Amino acid sequence: MYNIETVAKSLNQVRTLHQDLFNKWINYLDLSKNSTDTYTKDIRHFINYLRDNNITTPTRQDILNYKQSLQDKGLKATTINGYIMAIKQFFNWTETEHLYTNIAKNIKGAKVSNEFKKDYLTPDQAKQLLNSIDRTTDKGIRDYAIICLLITTGIRTIELKRAKIEDLRQNNTVLYIQGKGRDDKNEYVKVAPETAKAILDYLATRKDAKDTKPLFTSISNHNNEMEMTTRSISRIVKNHLINAGLKSDRLTAHSLRHTAGTLNLKAGGTLTETQQLLRHKSINTTMIYSHILDRENNNSEIRIANTIFNN
């Protein structure tokens, strides 16, 4: 029978005799490679906390203290919740395997605000961003196509990263995507003519544009024609936002997804249509966009000021 110290050792030192125990937990999770890597990193962070604080027999209070230490560091609620979720999964497994009591049962994560942390672009700002891109270079042609696709369809950077040339179908009017938490590409977004043209212009610059190749690739010397990373996509968008004079911590690649949802509602799209566009599981998530617009259109403060100062 293993004890928690053995489990901790196996997680801290993956290449030890306890690799089999580590693998048991990983297999129990039954997640994608990216999710597995994230859980592994997060649980090691907790194991390091136990080690640094000389805790060999952790209790529920130790987990609560750990959560508080994360909050004291000023980490985002979503980041903290990722760490806590890994711990909950881990101790659920240890109890299932009769290794250790589930001391994480019913521990709550950090409270996440329902408000979006990122801003969206107005139509004029969206045009400003697109018009600022130099399309006389292969890089500019690619970046313009990337931003066109993100801003008109609202797809996520991970979905753009996973896209292959063959996923662009029906005379280039739809793009099949592998959505968040999905294992296959059974969803699609419609590609506007302007966006389709931008993508085709970009593909015309590619030396290797076989159907099985990534839709967008790196053009760096070391990774030329290789699949892009979500980090590089985010960096490309952020750099173009700054170059367009749209410099703000609240404007990122994810802002383009918010832009798509918000502008669709402003242009007359319904909540249901916007939910389908962004592929939200719950319409309550989509309703946040509606609440934002309602607040923007609520000019109560101006009416109050006019009542006071203009009478």
Image (tube, grey):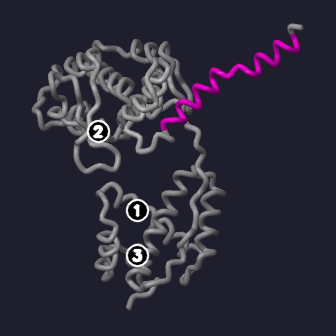
Mark number, residue 161: 2
Coordinates of residue 92 in the picture (x, y in percent): 44, 74
Coordinates of residue 297 in the picture (x, y in percent): 63, 20
Calculate the distance from the C-alpha at mark 1 to the C-alpha at mark 3: 13 Å
Residue 146: name its quadrant: top left
Residue on which the image places disc 1: 39
Q: Give the position of the N terminus as an image quadrant.
A: bottom left
Which residue is painted at 40% across and 75% down in the image?
Answer: 93
Report the magenta residues as a range: 286-309
Left or right, 118 with respect to 86, comes to right
Mark number, residue 246: none
The answer to the question of whether label 2 and label 1 lie on touching residues, with beta carbons closer than 8 A, is no
Which residue is painted at 26% across and 18% down in the image?
Answer: 198
Residue on which the image places disc 3: 93
Coordinates of residue 167 in the picture (x, y in percent): 18, 34
Give the class, few, some or many, for how many residues have Cα within 10 Å of label 2's Cα (few <14, many ≥20): many
Give the mark nearest the N terminus, 2 or 3: 3
> Residue 157, relative to residue 310: is it above or below?
below
Q: Is residue 125 magenta?
A: no
Calculate the distance from the C-alpha at mark 2 to the C-alpha at mark 1: 21 Å
Give the mark nearest the N terminus, 2 or 1: 1
Q: In the image, what residue type sits under mark 2?
A: Lys
Label 1 SS: helix
Q: In the image, what residue type sits under mark 3?
A: Trp
Label 3 SS: helix
Q: Is residue 308 magenta?
A: yes
Calculate the distance from the C-alpha at mark 2 to the C-alpha at mark 3: 32 Å
- What main secondary structure does the magenta stretch of the protein show? helix
Nearest to viewer (mark 1 / mark 3): 3
The answer to the question of whether label 2 and label 3 lie on touching residues, with beta carbons closer than 8 A, is no
Give the class, few, some or many, for how many residues have Cα within 10 Å of label 1's Cα (few <14, many ≥20): many
